[in-house]
Image (cartoon, helix red, strand yellow):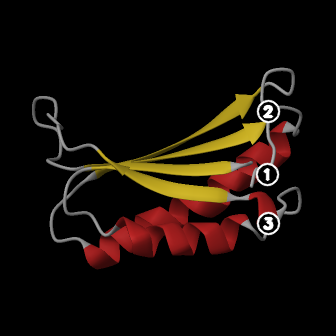
Amino acid sequence: MPHLQIDHYPNFPSKQLLKLLVEEFCRIETIDPAAVKAYARLADEFEPGYQAPNGFVHLTICVLAGRNQEVLEKMSDQLYPIGEKFLTENLKSPVSWTLEIREMTRHTYKKSTVC
């Protein structure tokens, strides 16, 4: 815990973006780098809305509840431009780029290392 989840359209180079996001995310003071889990999920069935871009990349940041608003905004403010820069430099056609932060309740989130 925490999780960085990228949902994306087909043929998107998610591995490169994940690496950049993890590097920056681990610099945030309340993040334990050893606990970060980052992964990408292909949306193989994607239908854009009328006049919407033909591709999308959505980052969900899942963290345990309890961080103050300033820290949550810092997460958003630090990671959003990394994705925006990556997309601008690596794609030839417009895509929708979005980011959201979800807070998970400490009472229901469970974690262990299992062999």
Contact check, label 1 and label 3, Cβ < 8 Å:
no
The image's mark for residue 110 is 2
Q: Earlier in the sequence, mark 3 or mark 2?
A: 3
Q: Amino acid at mark 2?
A: Lys
Outermost residue toward the top?
107
In this view, the mark in front (3 or 2): 2
Secondary structure beneath dot 3 equals: helix
Which quadrant: the C terminus? Answer: bottom right
Q: Is residue 92 above or below residue 104?
A: below
Q: Is residue 17 above or below residue 115?
A: below
Q: Nearer the viewer, residue 13 or 56?
A: 13
Outermost residue toward the front?
115
Q: Position of residue 84 (x, y in %)?
A: 43, 64
Disc 1 target residue? 113
- Residue 105 visible at all: yes
Disc 3 target residue? 34
Q: Amino acid at mark 1?
A: Thr
Q: Position of residue 96 (x, y in %)?
A: 30, 48
Secondary structure beneath dot 1 equals: loop
Residue drawn where x is 88% and y is 38% of the image: 68
Residue drawn where x is 72% and y is 31% of the image: 103
Q: Earlier in the sequence, mark 1 or mark 3?
A: 3
What is the C-alpha distance between the residues marked 3 and 2? 17 Å
Q: Position of residue 15 (x, y in %)?
A: 41, 70
Residue drawn where x is 79% and y is 32% of the image: 110
